Image (cartoon, coloured by chain):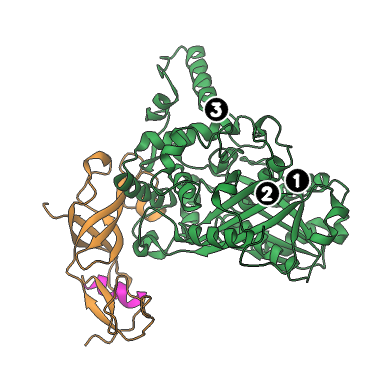
Amino acid sequence: MQGRRKLGREVALVGAGMSKFDVFRDKDSKHLFAEAFKEMLLTVDKGIDPRDIDALYLGNFTNDFFVHQGHWGPIISDLLGITPKPATRTEGACASSALAFREGVFAISSGFYDVVLVGGVEEMSKRSTEEVTHGLAMAASPYEVKAGFTFPGVFGATATAYFVKYGANREHLMNVTIKSHNNARLNPKAQFNVSIRDIMNSRIERAKSKRQTIPAWRDEKEFLRDPKANPVVAWPMYLYDCCPISDGASCVLLVGEEIAKKFTDDPLYVVGIGQGSGKGLHAKEDLTYFEATRHAAQEAYELSGFKPEDVQIAEVHDCFSIAEIIHLEDLGFFQPGEGYRAVEEGLTRLDGPKPINTSGGLKCKGHPVGATGTGQLVEIWKQLRGEAGKRQVPIKNLRIGATHSLGGTGGTCTFTILERR
Amino acid sequence: MEKRPFNDIAYEQFLNEEKLMGTRCQKCGALFVPPRPICIKCYSNKMEWIETKGNGRLAAFTCIAIGPPFMIKEGYDRKHPYVSGVVELEEGARVVARIEGVDGSKPESIKIGIPLRVEFLHRGKANNLKTFLAFKPLDL
């Protein structure tokens, strides 16, 4: 398959690793990136000498603000012992490492480099929720910030517009949350590797042991409707509609096509890449989709020659439950207004025809913003190679997977399609 | 004719003066609020300032329980959520603004499509005056 656009040289993914995503008091950005790097090295089937890495592209968004330290490119290249090779930091809010990945692909496809390390890192949890909310809002439009919008607020407002246009409601968003938790339960790297049912049971056990009133939730949705268990953050976004504050790092190794087999007999090929930019809330044509995602998807589909129905599995940027539903539509997996029904019908479950966010997604795997884009690639790497363990999707002939990132309130979006041959 | 530059500094000054101003393209008539220096419909840079009437309808909203420090300072918190929204002006452009005169703790009582009227929330004094754009229901 070859689409209308072309890369000068094909790019292969030959290794992928990540730290656990979680809240760590005793691990900083360097520690986390070292963990991701060490794991990546182990995934390169025939091995890699770090001295062969030509360049590093690193995504990071908030470390200037939260850790009071900028200029992370050389800090990480020094950490890995790959100086004086160039290290470039990319910033695209929550899509920061997705941009690093694209730069890495361009660097190889241009012929300039042969072996490129691409990754991302973020250290967020040492700040209060209010500080983090305020810091992340740096990536919203200045008008939104002044009007009091936070990130959950922007997606809350987006949800109200979507509800009115398509007749969805909060119950439909809960389906996304329940699915994400069920997937994350099978992912040991996930920050919340528990199902909603597990959380309910542990709360009930705790109430019993403390001789308190035992909660009478009959099912997961009743738990999610309980304001004590699931308080509002920015209506209609409740706690369980929102991704957490996380620390973590991830990285992948890219090489030119003709040397890929030196590293592994089973590389993944980067067949589609796309990126788009988008306007602030007030200037959007329609509040119920992201123009940047649609453009990114169009670019990636054009390059790959694949269509949305060819993508068998995807990680999408579910920073908030409503976002996952909208991405399913913007990426062409389902028609506009039908995403919430697809989730309700179970089509996006691990065992469904179009598994989405098998890792648990940002909601449950965690969202150390700069590490998220390459973290999604780690999941697709595992799934396409049949190495996802308990959460391996049961699709036969699995060979096409994709990742989607969204930065800010839709200002920067990317879409990447990987193929196993 | 209004001579101020077509930028956010002028836009903010107008808000201090209780005017919700935008720019209109002299070539194709497209209206932009907040102002744009370049028309993104026809790419003309012949713009002029236009004062909107300040009437609109609620297009989308959210009731925020965890706000940024400047909203917490105003007394909003998890028990007292505030409302931010997208307002479609009578003239067609949309703006983001605070929504006043509605109960953020009862989101179900707030309906998309309700008619709204502009309000200007002044904070600080003299050279430090900052004005926040807000709207409140017309029937208040």
Mark 3 residue element: loop
Q: Residue at the spot x=24%, y=54% of the render? A: B58
Tell me the kind of residue under disc 1: Glu
Mark 2 residue element: strand
- The number of numbered badges drawn on the structure is 3
Residue A346 horizontal side relative to residue A420, left or right: left
- The picture's colour for chain A is green
Residue at which label 1 appears: A35
Residue A341 horizontal side relative to residue A262, left or right: left
Residue at which label 2 appears: A249
Q: Residue at the spot x=37%, y=60% of the render? A: A281
Tell me the kind of residue under disc 3: Ser
> What range of the chain is rendered magenta?
B8-17
Q: Output the letter for the chain in orange.
A: B
Residue at which label 3 appears: A195
Q: Percent x, y for residue A346? A: 49, 32
Mark 1 residue element: helix
- Specify the principal SS of the magenta part: helix
Q: CA distance from mark 1 to mark 3?
A: 26 Å
Mark 3 burial class by Cα count in 10 Å: few <14, some 14-19, many 20+: many
Establish whether labels 1 and 3 are both on one chain: yes
Mark 1 burial class by Cα count in 10 Å: few <14, some 14-19, many 20+: some
